[in-house]
Amino acid sequence: MGIEKNWNIRIGCMKRGERNKISDVAGVTVGHCTLCDGAVQTGVTALLPHAGDLFHDKVMAACHVINGFGKSVGLLQIEELGSIETPILLTNTLSVGMASQALVEYMLEKNSDIGATTGSVNPIVCECNDGELNDLRGLHVRGEHVRYALSHCAAEFAEGAVGAGRGMRCHEMKGGIGSSSRTFLLDGRKYTLGALLLTNHALARDLIVAGTPVGRMLFPNDSGAEDKGSVITILATDVPLSEHQLKRLCRRTAVGLSRTGSMMCNGSGEIALAFTTANRIPHYSDRDVLPYGRVRDDAMDILFRAVSEVVEESVLSSMLHAEAVTGRNGRIVPSLADSLRKSGIRFGEM
């Protein structure tokens, strides 16, 4: 069970999913392509909302920008139409264009009607800047790396310094890819909500682990650094929700981020996406009015709590799964795991 089993760190009070990953939402899969060679420390992470034809069987979705220092692609149409029709890609800032083109090519191969007998397609690509460790100017991410990540999506996937997370820093230590999930009952039926985060944000002194000010314990002196990183949060659930309710979930991601010590500063970009696999939107339909389920608003609190817990845990999971990485100009970014082992901090004793 990830950080609880290995570190005795328990986040929240809700029940975790079987894998404690976003893939506990049935049909959701994740794949990575990791580039790690000297000054090249970057990659691509792909997420498939379901295993079917996403363009013709879209998922209802929403997005929310907490602080908009970012270069993502596709958010405008999500905001307007409330749906996602492609896989979701994560990569570094200057590779967004390449990843977007590769994703469009991938969708064109799978759907002969795009741009011919129907409209265009809305690729979703989000980013964080890994330039501290990675040769960002080298534009090392290529179309074949995007294809590799897409073709290797699975329910079991690695966390930490992998894929798009390879060169990322979180609280001035290694960040990257983190995931978590929670299960709960509505009308006696079990549902799941999961998160996948790309973490590249916040300062060392502000790090909080399960309520403990670990940052101040590990780093009593102010480094003088500025928070100019970003964090991308993807939420998935099998609860039938409207676009507005999904946006409400996106807004609650700020709670989980703040519980780990994020101040969401001026130079940081915090962007959240959320989708439900329960409400599908057909690209073609003979019906003018489509039936969809939604949760009674008074019953949303359990989902809000789940969002807070999975985001908080995913931040910490991204760090505790990540090893120290040496990258551009010999720069070394240490791992939180190594720092905790050296410090002797024991969470179960607190």
Image (spheres, grey):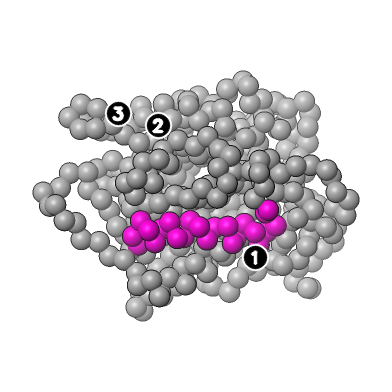
Find residue 40 and name its label.
Answer: none
Kindly identify the amino acid type of the residue bearing the numbered disc 3: Glu
Is residue 247 among what the camera can see?
yes
Mark toward the start of the polypeptide (2 vs 1): 1
Find residue 4 and name its label.
Answer: 1
Q: Is residue 262 magenta?
A: yes
Kindly identify the amino acid type of the residue bearing the numbered disc 2: Leu
Give the farthest residue toward the right.
Answer: 221
Q: Is residue 175 magenta?
A: no
Q: Are marks 3 and 2 in contact (CB under 8 Å)?
A: no
Residue at 38 percent across and 71 percent down: it is 297
Judge left or right: residue 57 versus residue 195: left
Residue annotated with mark 3: 109
Residue annotated with mark 2: 103
Q: Are marks 2 and 1 in contact (CB under 8 Å)?
A: no
- What segment is highlighted magenta in the picture? 241-263
How many residues crowd around disc 1 within 10 Å: few (fewer than 14), some, or many (20 or more)? some
Secondary element type, mark 2: helix
Q: x%, y% of residue 287? A: 12, 52
How many residues crowd around disc 2 within 10 Å: few (fewer than 14), some, or many (20 or more)? many
Q: x%, y% of residue 102? A: 42, 27
Secondary element type, mark 3: helix
